[in-house]
Structure formats: C-alpha cells, structure tokens
Image (cartoon, rainbow, N blue to C red):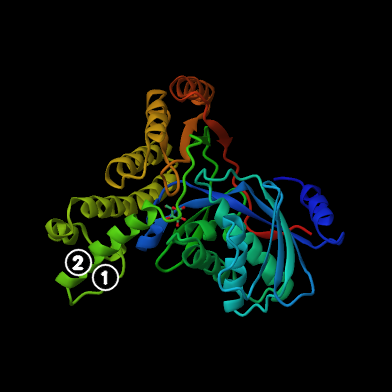
Amino acid sequence: MMEIDFVRSRFIKHFDGKTGNVYASPGRINLIGEHTDYNGGFVFPGAVDKGIMAEIRANGTEDTVMAYAIDLKDRVDFHLDDPAGPRASWARYIYGIALEMKKRGVPVKGFNIAFAGDVPLGAGMSSSAAMESCIAFGLNDIFGDNKVSQWDMVLAGQATEHNYCGVNCGIMDQFASVFGKAGCLMRLDCRSREFEYFPFKPDGYRLVLLDSVVKHQLAGSPYNDRRNSCENVVKHIQAKHPEGKFETLRDCTWEQLDEVRAEVGEEDYKRAKFVLGEKDRVLAVCDALNEGDYEKVGEMMYQTHEGLSKDYEVSCEELDFLNDIAKENGVTGSRIMGGGFGGCTINLVRNDLYRTFIADAKKRFNEKYGHEPKVYDVVIGDGSRKLC
Ligand code: GLA
C-alpha cells in the first residue's frame, strides 16, 4: 500500500491547504468463478494489498465536487446536480458513486477529493471497484454517519458501473473490495449473497499474477454481450418451462440447456455451457481446498481457462500464450482472471517451480511480444477502511 503522506501532500497542495479524512479500498483477485456473478452463481475472490487511496473533505458548498487524480495529474470540477455529469471517465466514477450514495439516503454535499492508486489499471484487478468502494466508504463516513450498510455500498458501486460507466457487471468486484479480509478468500453465493471467509495459506504453493499488459476495457464492450447471451438462454428455457422459475443460469440444468441449443444458436449455447461448468468448478475447488488438494484446484483452473478461451471467448493471444507457458512449466493451475479481453493470468505455483516459471515466462513473452509480462505476487489484504 502507498503512503498516506503521498496522497495528503497533494490534497493540501491542490485545494485550500486543509486536510480531510483518508480512506483506502483494495482491488481483488479471484481464484475461480468467472462470469458467474451475474448468473447467480458462486465466486471465490479475495482483496489484495493494492488499491485506491483517497482523501476527502466536505467543502461547504451545496453540490460542487473538486476532484484531483494524482496519478494522472488531472483536475476536474463538476456539480452533483448536473444531469450530464463530467466527461472524464475517472471523474464519472466519483459522480456516479456520489449520486448512488445519495439515492441510498446519504445527504452528500460538495466535497474535495484527491486520490491515487497502486492497483494496475486495466489489469483485471478491479481498479474501478476499488475506486467506487473507497469513495462510497468515505461519503458514508463524512455525510452519512456510516448508516449505509456494507452491502448497500457494494450495490451502489455496481449501480455506478451500470448507470454511469456502461458496464453491466455483477457484484463480485465491489463485494471483494468492501468485504475483503487479510489472509482470506471469500466464497460468495451471488444469488443469496451468503458468503464465508476461507483462510488461504496453501502450504508449498503461492499465487502469482502475470500481467500481459494488454489493456482490458469493459465499457461498451463484449462483456455486456456475454451477459446478454446468458440472459437470452434463460429466457428460452423459461419459455419452454412456464411451470418453473428461471431467473439466471443458476436455475438451469444441463438438460434444459441442451433443449434450447438449436433455438439459441451455437454462440449463446457455448457461453451458457461455460457458465454451468464454472458453477460446478467453484464448488469442486471448495471441496479440494478443504482437503488440501491443490493439484485438483489447479486442474479446475486450467479447465476454466479453456472454457473462457474457447467457449466464452474472452481470452486473447497473449493470455493463451501465458497459459501455455504455465502448463509447460508444470505450474499447478493457471487461467485468465477477471472479465478477460486482456489483463492477467492467475497462477497457482509450487514454490520450487516459481523461479524457473517466472524466468521462462518473462523470456518467452519478451521474445514474442517485445516486452515482459509484469509479475505481481498475491498478498491477500483487507477491504475498505478509514486510515485517518
Ligand atoms: C468483471 C466484472 C465482474 C465479473 C468479472 C468476471 O470483473 O466486474 O462483475 O463478472 O468481470 O468474473
């Protein structure tokens, strides 16, 4: 995590010399359970030790927000009652989450904010969810006596993506950012919202992310198409079975999926097939973790990669290449992490293979693409919090 003084010194310099409160929220990893959240399935994320830090102070105005993005050296001022909101994409997160917190009963007034991040942007580690939950947490504290619940902050972050940023995402990222706990992964049932903390200390193994540095961009992207495909399949199954209640693919069986295969077409069929398989894999991973069977966990991760690449079609050449290198190095498990279309692979690696794997991945990726992948050792950290 970055230093509070780094953010504070900029906040003082760019505004009126006064200090505010400082908040932090993390990005996330996800062991398994991809594209299952908006399908009512399970996910298995954890917060990381990297995220967004923001200093915020009420500025005494009714609705003027003065925002400074420290890393971009960009300043944007806007009004909360301006229906169009700011144009800069980073400022839209601030605008969106402020309005969503207002909707949930927080009397948000004008404020100054400066923020910085050390979670890589576009790497599939949810820098945007980190931003939303950090500001939600801060506004709840400053203007709302912390009366909005953690779950409502999660939903406010998700609604920000839907209503102001064009991404019809699920709840995994915001959930992980708000509820994260050091040393623990969390298994969340996205339908009932029940979850449990899962201490994760794989003896003899470690988790490492390899960032292809292919920027993933979910806004207005094929991400929403994938979601539409899943919803379309559910609609067809529901029409065939009016007696049942089918809200998401979670409610559908393999047989029912096969019944609608011809009508929905191969593309939607393959996407739904991935989701049903992924739902089962998360549960298999939980059992395997309980038994300390990391080889099984890894096997499931490779299967997920295969499905995300061939059936869900959210991989790219660089991520498939990193996955192949992992396999050839005998890495226990490896797969695309997050929404896809770029970003990172997550790798479960035996300690004794770690050095040779990383060296080989750097060398071969560099030979092929002219730069090395970035390497992030995973440290599972805490969720949203006030620092001072
Ligand atoms: C993005 C979305 C999440 C989730 C993942 C894929 O990170 O924000 O809601 O759907 O993709 O698992």
Q: Please, what is the three-letter code of the amino acid marked with disc 1?
A: Phe
Quadrant position of residue 22: bottom right
Where is residue 207? Give x, y as percent.
52, 37
Query: Ligand 1 appears in which quadrant?
Result: bottom left
- Rendered view: 219 above or below 96: above
Residue appearing at x 40%, y 37% in the figure = 298
Residue 237: which disc? 2
Q: Secondary structure at mark 1?
A: loop
- From the image, which quarter does the C terminus lie in? bottom right
Amino acid type for the residue under numbered disc 2: Ile
State the image coordinates of residue 338 (x, y, percent, origin top left): 45, 48
Local packing at callout 1 (Cα closer than 10 Å; few below 14, some 14-19, many 20+) is some
Q: Is 224 above or below relative to 81?
A: above
Residue in front for this viewpoint, 66 or 223: 66
Q: Which mark is residue 346?
A: none
User: Going 74% across and 71% down the picture, which residue do you hit?
Assistant: 142
- Above or below, comparing residue 26 to residue 304 in the picture: below
Which quadrant: the N terminus? Answer: top right
- In terms of depth relative to the viewer, which is nearer, 198 or 381? 381
Percent of width and height locating residue 83: 56, 74
Seen in the image, is 200 located left or right of residue 249? right
> In the rendered structure, are the residues bearing label 2 and label 1 in contact, judged by CB atoms less than 8 Å apart?
yes
- Side (left or right) of 326 relative to 179: left
For the residue carrying disc 2, how many other residues have a C-alpha within 10 Å: few (<14), some (14-19), or many (20+)? many
Q: Is mark 1 within 8 Å of ligand 1?
A: no
Question: Who comes first in sequence, dot 2 or dot 1?
Answer: 2
**Cα separation between marks 2 and 1:** 8 Å
- Location of mark 1 (residue): 246
Tell me if 192 is positioned left or right of 273 in this view: right
- Could you tell me which residue is drawn at 15 percent across and 70 percent down? 240
**Residue 38 appears in view:** yes
* Residue 341 locus on image (x, y percent): 41, 44
